[in-house]
């Protein structure tokens, strides 16, 4: 039952993230964005269904880590190299960018997997509570941004925490996986993250959330370069 609910939640989060970004892309880029992200997610699902991400499938190679790095490089590389893509993402209002992170309240699934003895410590508590805090704080912050009542420092602090949460979660996940780099060996390990639907978190959702944090940081930096006295969320 937990896997079924997790699949619905992960699918809904992906649809919300990909769809919202597509709304702000130019008419010719939106279909390519949607096609690329959907094809990537479909490829991840297919490989996972065939057991390609199982801990013993590639020997000691952390294939989920390779998939994470590949999609993250593609997203960040496109943001860096494509002026039109970058400009479109920077046009997304800050309340929308921050509000999308409310979906990270779904970090409660990590705590449920921990309680079900299917996810290890310290990975699950860190990833779970970090996401929950990021998502919960995003609610009042989004409302404040919508009223143009949020300070730059509050958005910066939240954005830094949300980014660090994802980085730490990825690092702990890798250090808990059965690879030559494994540090945390306590059962049950991170095998659950190599199976459906949980594989979608590190290989699809986390990279997109990291992209959103990058865009938020860029928007704040751009706004501060224009005015050092008043933070304008819509710019």
Image (cartoon, rainbow, N blue to C red):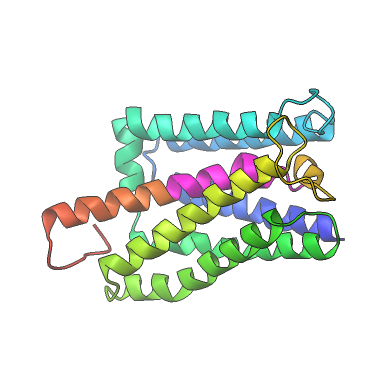
Q: Residue at x 49, y 59 (%)?
A: 100
Q: Quadrant of residue 40?
A: top right
Main SS class of the magenta portion in the image: helix
Place of residue 57 in the rendered image (x, y in percent of width and height, measured from the top left): 83, 26
Q: Is residue 203 magenta?
A: yes
Does 210 lie within the magenta span?
Answer: yes
Q: Is residue 102 left or right of residue 40?
A: left
Q: Camera-side residue: 224 or 123?
A: 123
Q: Compare residues 206 and 18 and report the one nearer the observer.
A: 206
Residues in magenta, as a range: 197-212
Residue located at (20% from left, 56% from top) = 223
Residue drawn at x 76%, y 47% as measured from the top left:
197
Q: Quadrant of the N terminus?
A: bottom right
The reply, left or right, for residue 93 in relation to residue 16 is left
Report the label total.
0
Q: Is residue 45 above or below residue 98?
A: above
Please name the residue shown 52% across and 45% down the image. 208
Regarding residue 97, the answer to whether it shows in the image is: no
Residue 136 percent coordinates (x, y): 53, 72
Quarter occupied by the C terminus: bottom left
Residue 7 locus on image (x, y percent): 76, 52
Q: Quadrant of residue 155?
A: bottom left
| Relative horizontal placement of residue 10, taking residue 213 as reference (left or right) | right
- Provide residue 65's location: percent of width, then percent of height: 64, 33
């Amino acid at each position: 039952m937990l896997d079924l609910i997790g699949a619905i939640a992960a699918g809904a989060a992906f649809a919300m993230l990909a769809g919202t970004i597509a709304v702000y892309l130019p008419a010719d880029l939106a279909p390519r964005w949607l096609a690329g992200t959907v094809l990537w997610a479909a490829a991840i699902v297919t490989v996972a269904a065939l057991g390609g991400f199982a801990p013993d499938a590639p020997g000691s190679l952390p294939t989920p880590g390779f998939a994470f790095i590949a999609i993250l490089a593609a997203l960040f590389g496109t943001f860096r190299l494509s002026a039109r893509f970058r400009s479109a993402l920077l046009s997304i209002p800050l309340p929308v960018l921050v509000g999308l992170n409310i979906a990270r309240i779904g970090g409660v699934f990590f705590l449920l997997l921990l309680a079900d003895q299917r996810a290890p410590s310290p990975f699950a508590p860190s990833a779970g509570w970090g996401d929950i805090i990021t998502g919960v704080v995003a609610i009042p912050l989004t409302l404040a941004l919508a009223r143009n009542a949020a300070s730059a420092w509050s958005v910066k602090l939240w954005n830094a925490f949300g980014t660090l949460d994802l980085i730490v979660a990825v690092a702990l996940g890798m250090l808990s996986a059965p690879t030559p780099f494994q540090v945390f060996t306590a059962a049950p390990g991170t095998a659950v993250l190599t199976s459906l639907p949980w594989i979608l978190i590190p290989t699809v959702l986390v990279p997109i959330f990291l992209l959103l944090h990058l865009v938020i940081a860029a928007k704040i930096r751009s706004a501060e370069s224009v005015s050092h006295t008043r933070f304008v969320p819509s710019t």
